[in-house]
Image: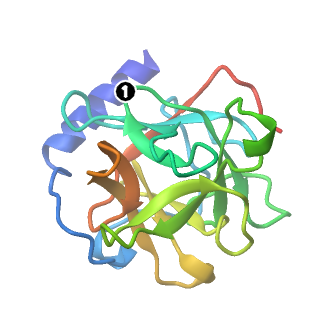
Amino acid sequence: MKTLALLFALSLYLLSHPTSAKLKPIRLGTDDVPIASTGAPVVDRDGDALQPGVAYNITSITWGAGAGEVKLEWRDTNTKCPSDVISWNYADPVVFTPADPKATAVLESSFLSFKFNVVTNFLCSGNLYWGVQHDAVSGMDFVRSDEFVENQSDRFKIERLDANFPTYIITYCPSGTDKCYYVGREYDESIKSTRLALSDFPFVLMFWKTSLASAK
């Protein structure tokens, strides 16, 4: 019942907070979208705090057209491992690890690494961390899965959009600077898929705890 009430409240929220515009990325900073992050724990759709090392699905707060969940795919066959982080009909679980080794919780506005918790072959088992790579053909910066790189893979943040609802966006802050960029969704003609990318409109989302208890 708590979940149904939350989803109904989120649908009312969206009526007055549209997120459908699409423009060529111009790398806006987070000050351009009002956020309500307080440094409190990030919560899932049931209102429970996200835990480091526990698997969650990342899903849009909308339904129907424009909705989607975050998934790891092998659309670019020029890579040796699945590396395309796309918006799809179903999700692959992700775990979050604070960049601060002393941190015991997933907090708003704190540096994190994102890692897919999926079964893959031995050669690709270390290539599950989120990062950002520039694509010269499209001119966009896509989120891709690869090996962990210090001061790059752990430069993501989760920011809360509204104090009354657990709606979030993801930002990327290269080299730990204060200049952060929105992670949104952009269609990539080369692989015929909508990918996560640095964009001028953030992907508004929530988190859903999966049946996978934890990830190593």
Q: Nearer the viewer, residue 123 or 3?
A: 123
Q: Residue at x 67, y 58 (%)?
A: 113
Q: Residue at x 35, y 46 (%)?
A: 191
Whether 115 is drawn above or below 208: the answer is below
Q: Residue at x 27, y 71 (%)?
A: 25
State the image quarter where residue 56 is shown. Answer: top right
SS at badge 1 = loop
- State how many labels appear: 1
Is residue 164 visible in this depiction of the protein?
Answer: no
Residue 204 lies left or right of residue 47; in this view the side is left
Its colouring scheme is: rainbow
* Residue wearing tag 1: 89
State the image quarter where residue 24 is shown. Answer: bottom left
Q: Amino acid at mark 1?
A: Asn
Q: Position of residue 49 (x, y in %)?
A: 63, 41
Q: Position of residue 142 (x, y in %)?
A: 43, 61
Q: Position of residue 201 (x, y in %)?
A: 27, 62
State the image quarter where residue 125 is shown. Answer: top right
Quadrant where the C terminus lies? top right
Residue 16 lies left or right of residue 32; in this view the side is left
Whether 93 is drawn above or below 185: the answer is above
Is residue 18 visible in this depiction of the protein?
Answer: yes
Quadrant where the N terminus lies? top left
Q: Nearer the viewer, residue 169 or 125?
A: 125
Q: Position of residue 208 (x, y in %)?
A: 52, 31
Residue 141 lies left or right of residue 23; in this view the side is right
Q: Residues within 10 Å of mark 1 (few under 14, many from 20)?
A: few
Q: Residue at x 21, y 27 (%)?
A: 64
Q: Nearer the viewer, residue 94 or 142?
A: 142
Q: Residue furthest top?
A: 1
